[in-house]
């Protein structure tokens, strides 16, 4: 079925709003760090919002604009219109739409993360590709937002009385599907009180919007039940952190360009070049896919989080995994990037991964042979001999690599790149001067 034009989608939204007597519509967008922003308009403002957008103060949004250029315009994307799940205090259904951000003169705002992803998707489209992704976001349920007391002691795929969050997951899945987010799986993850709901593979822009919706709904459902859900990458010392494994592939029409029946491992030359691009540029874009100081408490050996620049088909300790081909599932051929975490900005994360993969294709980069042994158990000498590098070990190191990266600057654009780097440097400085509980317990008694 052909996609509706903006005019057709707008007309459909106006009809739904009238038929369902909707009074309020929430307009959503994100800042450069991936935090969801929102303001509400009434139905009387809706036609004007579609035509001219709604003005707001961009200087108050992280990474958007300086005081002297603060005026911004949010224009809703009618294709993203959905009815929010009913809440007890709402007498009428409430609509929501994602927005694209513009300057008052009508030109697209280069600091809008949605614009950044759209620009990278256009680069792929100019080469004939459609970029599909399927992120797997893990998260924790805790008793409240001040502690890390778990709700259960369950483990991977457990279905026992210990999995007390089953009803929370079920309610979340229903709410997400009501919002148009396709769901494939939901299950308990490895660590106590850790869970995962997997969204159905989709176009990268639709998926980035879905990630933002997913994170909000998971938290809202938890809050409605008096508990706290968090996408913090490493909230508890000594157990697995939360990742966002990103499955990705490039299609031309209905053909998956990553599949080749005669290729080694059933991978096409395009897939191998794309994979090689991810491996080559991963250290440079890690500050985008893992953007917090806490992100690097997860990226350590021994907890299933990949830190070594290698790939494999069976081994889940590698940075990139290529799930084995199953006959009849050519369209499912993909590469899985395992380092990103669920607290990143999905628009920027998908942008830098796509940019790295396309660079690999355009430059004809060749990946090394897959590493099926456990990389963690190799000695440093063996890893060095085999040319297996590592991801940066801290946010500070990651930001230094990103700051020198021509690829990431090109992918994000100067505005977002400069604002993002400046923000991350401030975070590193703020963290550096903190006195932690570890230091007090370790040093106060003896120094």
Image (cartoon, grey):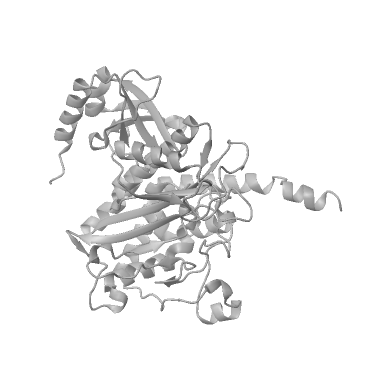
Picture residue at 57% right of the left edge, 59% below the top? 397
In which quadrant of the rendered view does residue 61 lie?
Answer: top left
Question: Can residue 172 be seen in the rendering of this structure?
Answer: yes
Picture residue at 22% right of the left edge, 67% below the top? 328
Picture residue at 28% right of the left edge, 37% below the top? 107
Picture residue at 30% right of the left edge, 69% below the top? 271
Indicate left or right for 3 with 367 as reference: left
Residue 210: x, y in percent?
Answer: 34, 43
Residue 275: x, y in percent?
Answer: 36, 68
Closer to us: 214 or 294: 214
151 relative to 316, above or below: above
244 relative to 179, above or below: below
Closer to us: 408 or 76: 76
Indicate left or right for 357 with 383 as reference: left
Indicate left or right for 395 with 93 as reference: right
Labels in figure, total: 0
Question: Can residue 65 be seen in the rendering of this structure?
Answer: no
């Amino acid at each position: 079925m052909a996609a509706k034009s903006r005019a057709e989608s707008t007309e459909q939204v106006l009809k739904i709003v009238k038929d369902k007597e909707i009074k309020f519509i929430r307009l959503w967008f994100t800042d450069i760090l991936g935090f969801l922003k929102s303001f509400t308009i009434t139905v009387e403002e809706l036609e004007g919002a579609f035509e001219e957008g709604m003005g707001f103060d961009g200087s108050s949004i992280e990474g958007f604009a300086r005081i002297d250029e603060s005026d911004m315009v949010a224009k809703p994307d009618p294709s993203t219109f959905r009815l929010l799940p009913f809440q007890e205090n709402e007498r009428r259904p409430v609509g929501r739409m994602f927005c694209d951000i513009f300057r008052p003169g009508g030109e697209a705002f280069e600091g809008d993360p949605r614009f950044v992803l759209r620009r990278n998707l256009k680069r792929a489209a100019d080469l004939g590709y459609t970029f599909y992704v399927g992120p797997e976001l893990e998260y924790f349920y805790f008793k409240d937002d001040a502690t890390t007391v778990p709700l259960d002691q369950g483990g991977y795929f457990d279905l026992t009385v210990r999995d007390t969050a089953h009803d929370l997951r079920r309610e979340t899945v229903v709410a997400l599907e009501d919002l148009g987010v396709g769901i494939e799986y939901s299950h308990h993850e490895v660590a106590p009180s850790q869970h995962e709901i997997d969204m159905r593979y989709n176009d990268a822009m639709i998926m980035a919007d879905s990630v933002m919706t997913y994170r909000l709904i998971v938290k809202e459902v938890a809050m409605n039940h008096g508990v706290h859900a968090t996408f913090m990458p490493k909230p508890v010392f000594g157990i697995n952190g939360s990742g966002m494994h990103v499955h990705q592939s490039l299609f031309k029409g209905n053909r998956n360009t990553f599949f080749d029946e005669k290729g080694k491992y059933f991978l096409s030359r395009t897939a191998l070049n794309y994979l090689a691009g991810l491996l080559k540029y991963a250290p440079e874009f890690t500050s985008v896919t893992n953007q917090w100081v806490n992100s690097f408490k997860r990226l350590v050996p021994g907890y299933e989080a990949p830190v070594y620049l290698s790939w494999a088909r069976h081994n889940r300790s590698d940075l990139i995994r290529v799930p084995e081909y199953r006959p009849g599932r050519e369209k499912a051929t993909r590469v899985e990037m395992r380092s990103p975490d669920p607290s990143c900005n999905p628009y920027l994360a998908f942008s830098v991964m796509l940019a790295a993969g396309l660079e690999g294709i355009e430059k004809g980069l060749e990946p090394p042979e897959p590493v099926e042994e456990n990389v963690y158990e190799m000695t440093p000498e063996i890893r060095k001999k085999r040319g297996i590098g590592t991801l940066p070990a801290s946010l500070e190191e990651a930001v230094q690599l990103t700051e020198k990266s021509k690829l990431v600057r090109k992918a994000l654009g100067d505005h977002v790149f400069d604002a993002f780097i400046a923000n991350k440097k401030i975070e590193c400085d703020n963290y550096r001067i903190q006195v932690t509980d570890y230091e007090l317990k370790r040093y106060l008694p003896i120094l």
